[in-house]
Structures are given as structure tokens and as C-alpha cells.
Amino acid sequence: MSAHEENRLREQISTLGKSLFDRGLTMGSSGNISVRLDDGGWMMTPTNACLGRLDPARISRLDGQGQWLDGDKPTKEQFLHMAMYAERPQSGAIVHLHSTHSVAVSCLPGIDHCDCIPPLTAYYVMRVGKLPLVPYHVPGDPKLGDAVRGLAGQHSAVLLANHGPVVAGKDLEAAVYATEELEETAKLFLLLRGENPRALNEEQVAELKRRFPA
């Protein structure tokens, strides 16, 4: 990878991280972002870093085995990213947030653990699809990585119970857009609870998947 391309990705991570933070989709030092590199390695946001104040030069660089090479120490939730990448060779970036409405959905009783949010809009179907719930684990528990790995091959996004979403995309822009779509749809879902909302039916969902394959 050229120095120019590496610098571009560092700037993009910082810019999009700040955008997510400024709009309240993550807070404090929560949330993390990673990008897959052409040489098989990764860039990741550092541990205890605020996405609103990232220094591009200090973003973590990892090799193809996930070993820390330079920059600040990577996020302690590195294992979540590695679990998703292991099952999704087509994915070029991952965003993990503690976004309010998505976390709220993850705490609700009675949601469908195979598909936490119904297909309320076309763009949710196109960018997120089905959203399975990963059972609660203590943050940092390696078993959480195993649970994510078991679902990542079939789903580009998962929702960690009482924790937040992990969303993969073909590149960082796509992963951020999908994360934003998930959060807005979670907000809609909460607003409509008890109203028996009209979701897209199976035929409408199938048509979207035919016309807009992932």
C-alpha cells in the first residue's frame, strides 16, 4: 500500500469517526472503526480513543495476523472486528458503536433474536438486511468473538445484547452508511412500538434483494 493511500484511509477514519461522534451516534471513548488493507493487515482506532478527536497519525496499524505494528494500541474490542473479518472476506471495513436507539432495541424483551428489527424501509433492507441478536457477554469476553463469528458469515450486521451493533461493509463509507441506517431504523422501530406498523412483506423484501444484491 502506498503512503498516499494509507494517509487517505487514516484521514477518512478520522473524518467519519468525528461525523459519527458529532451527531451523537457514539459518545465518550465508546465505539471503534477498522479498515482492511490491501496487504492483508488492518487499521483500527486505538483503545480508549474518542472518535470525535482521532489523530490520523496515531491510528493503530496491524499486520495480517492481527499483531500490533505501530500507532497507539488498538481497541480492546479488536477481537470483534477480527471475528467478523474472518467470516466476511468481502468486507473492507467494520464499525462498532454503542448508539442509543440500537442499544435500546438490544435491551427489549420479546424481540425476534433472529431478526431484531422488522423490514420497515427499503433502505434498511438494502443496507442492513436481517439483524440477529448476539446473547450478552461481559465486554472483552473472547466467547463474544466466537458468538459473532457464528453469525457473521450470513449477516453483515449483528446486534450485541445490552451493548450495540457491529456492522461490516465493502468499504468504510458503506459500513458507516449501514450503521447510520440501522440507528435510524431502530429509532423508527421504537417510535412505532405498540402501533402494529406496516412492514415490507416477503415479496417486497425479495424484490429488493434481486434488484440490489449485496
Image: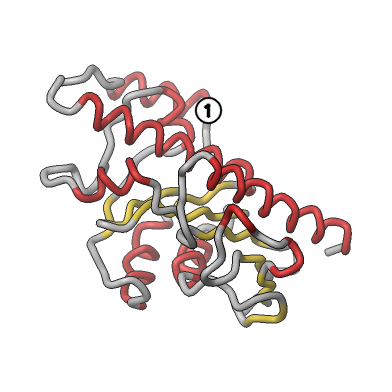
Indicate the position of residue 173 as horizontal and vertical percent values.
63, 42
Q: Residue at x 44, y 67 (%)?
A: 80
Q: Is residue 138 above or below residue 178?
A: below
Quickly name the residue at label 1: 212
The picture places residue 187, in percent across and down from the top left corner, at: 33, 32
Residue located 40% across and 32% down the image: 184
Residue 183 percent location from the top left of the image: 40, 38
Query: In the picture provided, is 169 more to the left or to the right than 111?
Result: right
Q: Secondary structure at mark 1?
A: loop
Q: Quadrant of residue 2?
A: bottom right
> Can you give x and y, in whole percent of width and height, for residue 20 in the image?
54, 44
User: Is residue 4 positioned above or below 40 on the image?
Assistant: above
Residue positioned 70% across, 81% down in the render = 69
Q: Nearer the viewer, residue 114 or 124?
A: 124
Q: Is residue 179 above or below residue 89?
A: above
Amino acid carrying label 1: it is: Phe
Query: 10 Å neighbourhood of mark 1: few (<14), some, or many (≥20)?
Result: few
